[in-house]
Image: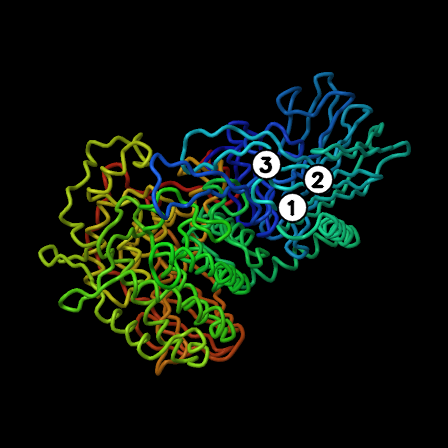
Amino acid sequence: MITHSSYVVEPWCLRETELSLDLLSQSESVFALSNGHVGWRGNLDEGEPHGLPGAYLNGVHELHPLPYAEAGYGYPESGQTLINVTDGKIIRLLVDDHPYDLRYGELTAHERVLDFRTGVLRRTAEWTSPAGLAVRITSERLVSFTQRAIAAIAYEVEPLSGGATVAVQSELVANEQMPHDIGDPRVAAAIDCPLLPEEDFARDTRLRLVHCTRQSAQRVGAAADHLVEGPEGTTWSAESEPDVSRLTITSTLRPGQKLRLVKFVGYGWSAERSMSALRDQVEGAVAAARSTGWDGLLAEQREFLDTFWDGADVEVEGDAQIQQAVRFSLFHVLQAAARGEERAIPAKGLTGTGYDGHSFWDVESYVLPMLTFTAPQAVGPVLRWRHATLPAARDRAHQLGLAGAAFPWRTITGAECSAYWPAGTAAFHVNADLAHAVVRYVAATGDETFERGPGLELLVHTARLWRSLGHHDAEGVFHIDGVTGPDEYSAIARDNLYTNLMARRNLVAAAEVATRYADRAEELGVDDEETAAWRDAAARMAVPYNEALGVHEQSAGFTHFQHWDFEGTSPEQYPLLLHFPYFDLYRKQVVKQADLVLAMLTCGEMFTAEEKARNFAYYEPLTVRDSSLSACVQAIMAAETEHLRLAYAYLGEAALMDLENLEHNTRDGLHIASLAGTWMALVVGLGGMRQHPGADGGPDRLGFAPRLPERLSRLKFTVLVRGRRLRVDIRASAARYTLAEGDPMHLVHHGEDVTVAAGEPVQRPIPPLPAQPEPQQPKGRDPADRAASGLPDAGEGAGTS
């Protein structure tokens, strides 16, 4: 959508200069506001027209049965779906009895701006009613980062052509009518009227609704209070019924007069608390917000974001679209996680119900790497949520006849709810992804309390799964059979390389941490024999390799499969999963998303530079990128294997995944992992950032191997490591490292050891890049070449360049 003429490329905001009803669903996603606890889609204030109405509370879901043609032992019994809770953002307007509806009358001006620095969505519209009365409507909307339960709107209307009698209806609405399923498996299961009414209330300027979900038995409360400013004679009244609570304000406005409404909305939910307790909770949250006031909320929001941007901003010179996109990405990933507070981060955040609101392995492998180095305070709670679901994961492992814990492929509560077991249950690599996230977080923050507590437990129980899932053959080689790696077009494989190498890391890390905290490990039943078994399995882990081709195999035997007929596959047949049976995909050499290539990123020490180059060249022509998780990883490995034009192209694809609606499902919510992948492609890819093991078992060191494509003249970013704030400034020929605060840091720059102290920047040259042939992609699946394309300057509408 950024290529649409309605959108302008600007460095610190997303601006829509006219309203296009054809883009309404996508715009609702990109203009969504959230804090990780409360989420509001970017619907128009009036509620209609809409693509997908949405107000969400993290964790609030409904259960539904999972039908199977044939029952099977161990199949999940029920699915979980994020639901639309009470919508508090609706403010309807009538002008002399004519509803303000953009489908009627004449919309003469309309602009929306999402400001990444203030966290506010601003809207201005000028509309002439069918009766010829013109009004201007302005609104500002926020979901508070500082007051977790609060969202708020400031809404103002003024006449432009003579006087007008206006009525403003501020509502809380439950059980909104939802659009029907369109047959895309990535779309949420539709659940009609999931909320059962328990209480409705309206008095003076206060509104409240309390509901309970039918099957999951979660109680949801929403309350609102208002500040009204208008000319003399302005009146209001309140009314409620089970699914609607409404404040109606009427005023006769003369030219120059305005009616202004500030609406504070508070949310809460619980599966355990009583109705009266929840009622008091939401009323208290609204009272606190009203005491803070609209200006106070704005000030708190700006202060919160100023702190975030000081440690997270990425500056890009030479490509205005990428500059806008990376800040858009950082802002939305922050919104998905900031106040989640031991809840999952859904794949779409709280911007839509795509993927049923489930959390996947994407969080640990894509979202947490970015947050670990930009907002580490948001990472510990996510990992503690995983720890809180450990009982469910242990039960699942027991059900499968395994030791330890089997964490779910997709979930809201911690229970597996994927009905397709080859891509669900068999994707055991989620265990290792979680373990890797634990190790990364502790290395970057030094949080020993977490490591000794939840971290150790997670590492021990995930390691136990690998030891029971795998086996030693007659030669002592350790194999893990019947699993599915990140590539969902290859299932139930033997020795998936990504899974094996990540399991190896998991086993080694568990043994090391258990040794470090021997007393805690003993409480978990870990002894020397068990840690020795972990180390032995890791040392003898199978690593599939095709000697004839000189490349690693994605899984044992993969390179002997028949190649997919890329020449005979039309562009309309992608993504393949919507047009071909999985049976056909599973037995061919075709890769949905980076799998072995991802292994080279996460376990880079297991490959030589020459092996990485050969592997990347082999798997590029097989990878169709039918997943939004692929482009950022390919960008990183293209950069490491010195294909900068290709790295830059993949960076563009990751960065514009939602702004250009590349997967054609942004309507259902943003791709949070791909947004985080934009940061990864820039910092880990072009910046070459890696975590290197510390000397003598000390803290990990950061390494950098920066290189810029010709189009970019500068890349500047900040990373937070163990209380230090490191600023990295990369230009074509040199990189400069500045420690803004903290103790001296030992770094690696293109293999050279470097020490940086506060106030003493260090600059190092960037070695020249050798010329070499670039690998090809499947027919019709090559990424757009940004180096050869004309790109808009900042401030231009991308569609007019």
Residues tagged 1 and 2 counted as in contact (Cβ below 8 A):
yes
Residue 479 against residue 417 in the figure, above or below: below
Name the residue rendered at 18%, 36% in the picture. Answer: 565
Mark 1 element type: strand
Label annotation for residue 416: none
Q: Looking at the picture, which amino acid does disc 2 mark?
A: Glu
Mark 2 crowd level (few <14, some 14–19, many ≥20, 10 Å Cα): some
Badge 3 is on which residue? Answer: 194
Residue 41 in sight from this viewpoint: yes
Residue 631 x/y as whole percent: 35, 48
Apparent side of residue 36 relative to residue 69 in the rendered image (left or right): right
Badge 2 is on which residue? Answer: 198
Residue 204 x/y as whole percent: 85, 39
Badge 1 is on which residue? Answer: 219
Residue 455 x/y as whole percent: 46, 69
Residue 640 against residue 566 in the figure, above or below: below
